[in-house]
Amino acid sequence: MQSLKSLKFQPIVSTALVAVNVIVFAACHFTGDFLYSVGRLDVYSVLVWGEYGRILWSMFLHSGIDHLFNNMLILFFLGSMIEKEVGHVRYGVLYFLSGIGGNLLSLASRALQRDPAASLGASGAVFGLDGVLLAMVLFSGRRMENVTPVRVLLMIGYSLYSGFVGHNIDNAAHVGGLLTGFVAASVICVFMRWRQRPAD
């Protein structure tokens, strides 16, 4: 019983997500362009050929070791903190919703611009964790040590700025993931507070 209780506060999902991303990145080096060709997110493959799985698969592909390292570093440390607060299942749901939301906005943006370029990476889901953290400090009613709305907003602002001044960055995926994570986590926070309200 004690071991099960301790598992509740371990970053099981965050660790698993990092491990899968690293394994997929390693596999890409042994399969050449195969995994990239079947997993990259682009308008033509998804909207014309109906390969909707790319909306999910592209979240596990990274263009290089720096891309992978930056995303996994944030995923593990920020994700571990959030997972401890909301639980394994809710955290997993929020992560994947954020990634999917980010990729959907990315597709919509590229379709409107008639941009044939492909994108990949966990950045949309990682930005979603920023949105989740913001929703938690605003609506959960729980204090998180050294985490304030101002600090979270500054972190989000800096992250978005870095993306917009960078090159070959899918900013639509970042914004989409951020908004999806924020909205989904806000709903969960409000629902949890409603359930915990004292009975009349």
Image (cartoon, rainbow, N blue to C red):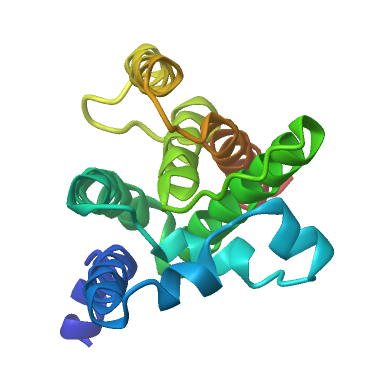
Task: Report whether 113 appears left or right of 69.
Answer: right
Image quadrant for the N terminus? Answer: bottom left
Quarter location, residue 24 = bottom left
- Residue for point 41% across, 65% down: 60
Q: Position of residue 109 (x, y in %)?
A: 72, 34
Image quadrant for the C terminus? Answer: top right
Q: Position of residue 147 (x, y in %)?
A: 29, 25
Task: Report whether 175 appears left or right of 154.
Answer: right
Q: Residue furthest bottom?
A: 1
Q: Note whether residue 66 is visible.
A: yes
Quarter location, residue 38 = bottom right
Quarter location, residue 144 = top left
Q: Is residue 71 above or below residue 46?
A: above
Q: What is the total number of numbered labels drawn onto the structure image?
A: 0
Q: Position of residue 55 (x, y in %)?
A: 62, 62
- Residue for point 62% across, 37% down: 176
Q: Nearer the viewer, residue 49 or 97?
A: 49
Q: Is residue 2 above or below residue 118?
A: below
- Residue for point 36% across, 13% down: 154
Q: Is residue 135 above or below residue 12?
A: above
Task: Report whether 183 appears left or right of 134.
Answer: right
Q: Note whether residue 188 is visible.
A: no
Q: Is residue 193 above or below residue 37?
A: above
Q: Nearer the viewer, residue 23 or 11?
A: 23
- Residue for point 39% across, 62% down: 61
Q: Nearer the viewer, residue 118 or 136?
A: 118
